[in-house]
Structures are given as structure tokens and as C-alpha cells.
């Protein structure tokens, strides 16, 4: 296990983003999976990035659409015809 | 590709309309109700996260839906309605709302652009942000961090992480090349991480283990 600094940490971070965003090719994904087995620094980055996405997705409060908005829109549209 | 052209035609509407589909009144209403209206929750929240104002968000959503209806003939059935609507909303925001919003986004944006284009970008900025710290953060803290980002950075994170658009869809919504989507997202995420780190420090989260 490599515990020192990853020489390519910034490149790896870009790759982590691609993989977590489901935008990576299967080669890129395989490369990262292998790399994460070797590199603690990048594994930590990976876990942090993953957790940030989870937090954004699950913990932000959504606002309720004002009740009258849909009706206002529909009324205006029937005016346009 | 086809979809991209459909999306584009929103701006060049009149001239492109001649090439588009013509829906009957019933078809229009069906499309509107089944393809457009179901996205109103996402649209309203996107509008609110851009403008931080209830009335502005309402106006933006209403304007977007009216435009969508008026130019419905340039919408190709079967293509991504949500992306089309988001693109209209984003354009409305830029054209009309951004000017009057309180956001000093230009200044912020240039500052961070310069910073992130500099060589210092390789410095690890997250050394003391930890997974368990993040797990302890509540929605308000995450939301404060997100809202503190300049609008262009905030937007890519909303589109990607909250709404699940692909890079390709984001490129179309934002009218930027896919490479720019990638780099802007990368910067946005670094900035967000930095905000979260600052926040964690100020709350004394780092003492937890």
C-alpha cells in the first residue's frame, strides 16, 4: 500500500469525477479500480467525492412548488390558445 | 445530435419553426401535460437555486413554460423534454434575471477562474476533510456551501449531481463544449470541497474522529 503522495493525484481526481459521474470508459474505470487498490490518497479522495455527491443528492431540501403556479401557467396558456 | 438542433432552435425559433413539427391543439396540450409539466418540481428548485428568490423563481418557471408552449413546435417528441426546458430556463435567467439578482458573480467568477488556472491547482485542498465529517453535516451546511459558489459553478453541480444530467446534456443546456463542462465541473467541485472544508473547520468538525 502506498501511503505517500500520489504523483498523479490531480489526474486521478479527474478520473474519479468521470467514474462517479458515469462518464468514464470501461478502460478508465478499470484503471481507477486498480489504482485505488494501491493508492490510499486517491482512495480517500474517491470516498470524499462520493460522500459529497451523496450529501448533495440526499440532504438538500427541495422547495415545494407554490400551489397556484401550475394553475397560473395553465390559465395563461389557455389565453394564448 | 438531432436533439441538439431541437434545443438550439429555441433561440432561433421563428425561422426554424418552418422546419419543425406542427402539433394540433390537442397534441400540444397532451405534450405539455405529459412531457413538460411533470418537471415543474425540478424546474422550480433549479430556478430558486439560481435566483434565491421565491418570486423570481416563480416568474422564471412561468416564463419558461409559456415559452415552451409558444415554441412547442420546435420540440421533437421523444427527445429529452427536461433538458429542453432547463435550457430555456437557464437562458431566461441569463437574459433577464441575472442582471437584477444581487449576485456579484462576475467578480467571483474571474477570481476563481484565475485561481484555478494557476499552478497552485495541484495543491491538495482537502487534506482535513473527512468522510465522517461530511456524514455529520446537515442539509443546511451543504446547501450554504453550494449557494456560496458563483452561479456558473453552482449551475453545473446542480445539473450534474442534483438533476443527473449527463455531460452531453449539460453541454447542450449550457451552450458550451463538453470539455468546458468537464473542467467547469472539476473546478466547481474543488471550490465546493474547499467551502465544505472551511465550514468543517469553523464548526470544529475536524476534532471528531
Image (cartoon, rainbow, N blue to C red):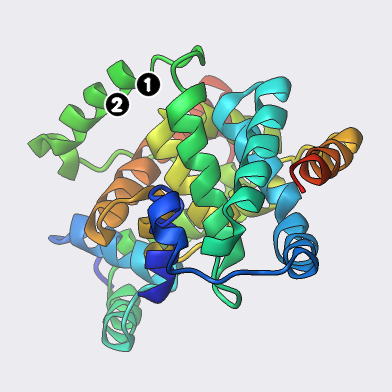
Dot 1 alpha-carbon crowd within 10 angstroms: few under 14, some 14 to 19, many 20 or more? some
| Residue tagged 1 | B105
The image quarter containing residue B48 is: top right
Give me the residue at 60% from left, 74% from top. Answer: B77
Residue B18 position within the rendered picture, expressed as x and y whole percent measured from the top left? 44, 64
Residue that appears at 67% across and 38% down: B61
Viewer-proximal residue among B123 and B57: B57
Q: Residue furthest left?
A: B119
- Both on one chain, marks 2 and 1? yes
Callout 2: residue from which chain? B
Residue B170 visible in this rendered orientation of the protein: no
Position of residue B151 in the picture relative to residue A29 (left or right): right
Q: Is residue B35 left or right of residue B199?
A: right
Q: Which mark is residue B209?
A: none
Q: Nearer the viewer, residue B1 or B144?
A: B1
Label 2, residues with CA under 10 Å away: few <14, some 14-19, many ≥20: some
> Is residue B192 or residue B88 the one in the foreground?
B88
Mark 2 and mark 1: Cα distance apart in space: 6 Å
Give the residue drawn at x 21%, y 55%.
A10
Residue B30 horizontal/vertical position (percent): 79, 67
Task: Give yes or no for contact between labels 2 and 1 (Cβ–Cβ under 8 Å).
Answer: yes
Quarter holding residue B122:
top left
User: Quick check: B20 above or below B115?
Assistant: below
Q: Tell me which corner region of the image, top left, top right, bottom left or bottom right, holds residue A11.
A: bottom left
Give how far across and how far down residue A26 sits, in percent: 33, 87
Q: Is residue B14 at least partly visible in the picture?
A: yes
Q: Secondary structure at mark 1?
A: helix
- State whether residue B113 is above or below residue B129: above
Mark 2 lies on residue:
B109
Q: Chain of mark 1?
A: B
Amino acid at each position: 500500500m502506498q501511503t505517500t503522495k500520489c504523483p498523479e493525484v490531480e489526474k486521478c481526481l479527474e478520473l474519479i469525477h468521470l467514474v462517479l459521474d458515469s462518464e468514464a470508459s470501461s478502460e478508465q474505470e478499470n484503471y481507477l479500480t486498480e489504482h485505488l487498490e494501491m493508492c490510499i490518497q486517491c482512495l480517500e479522495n474517491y470516498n470524499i467525492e462520493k460522500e459529497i455527491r451523496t450529501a448533495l443528492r440526499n440532504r438538500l431540501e427541495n422547495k415545494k412548488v407554490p400551489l397556484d403556479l401550475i394553475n397560473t401557467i395553465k390559465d395563461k396558456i389557455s389565453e394564448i390558445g | 445530435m438531432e436533439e441538439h438542433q431541437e434545443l438550439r432552435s429555441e433561440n432561433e425559433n421563428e425561422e426554424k419553426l418552418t422546419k419543425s413539427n406542427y402539433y394540433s391543439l390537442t397534441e400540444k396540450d397532451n405534450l405539455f401535460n405529459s412531457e413538460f409539466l411533470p418537471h415543474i418540481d425540478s424546474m422550480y428548485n433549479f430556478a430558486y437555486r439560481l435566483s434565491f428568490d421565491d418570486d423570481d423563481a416563480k416568474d422564471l418557471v412561468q416564463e419558461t413554460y409559456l415559452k415552451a408552449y409558444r415554441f412547442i413546435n420546435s420540440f421533437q417528441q421523444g427527445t429529452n423534454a427536461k433538458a429542453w426546458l432547463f435550457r430555456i430556463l437557464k437562458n431566461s435567467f441569463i437574459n433577464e434575471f441575472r442582471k437584477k439578482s444581487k449576485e456579484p458573480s462576475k467578480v467571483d467568477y474571474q477570481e476563481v477562474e484565475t485561481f484555478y488556472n494557476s499552478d497552485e491547482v495541484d495543491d491538495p485542498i482537502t487534506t482535513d476533510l473527512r468522510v465522517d465529517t461530511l456524514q455529520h453535516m446537515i442539509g443546511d451546511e451543504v446547501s450554504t456551501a453550494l449557494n456560496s459558489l458563483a452561479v456558473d459553478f453552482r449551475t453545473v453541480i446542480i445539473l450534474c449531481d442534483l438533476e443527473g444530467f449527463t455531460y452531453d446534456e449539460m453541454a447542450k443546456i449550457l451552450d458550451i463544449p463538453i470539455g468546458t463542462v468537464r473542467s467547469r465541473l472539476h473546478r466547481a467541485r474543488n471550490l465546493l470541497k474547499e467551502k465544505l472544508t472551511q465550514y468543517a473547520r469553523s464548526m470544529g468538525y475536524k476534532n471528531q474522529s
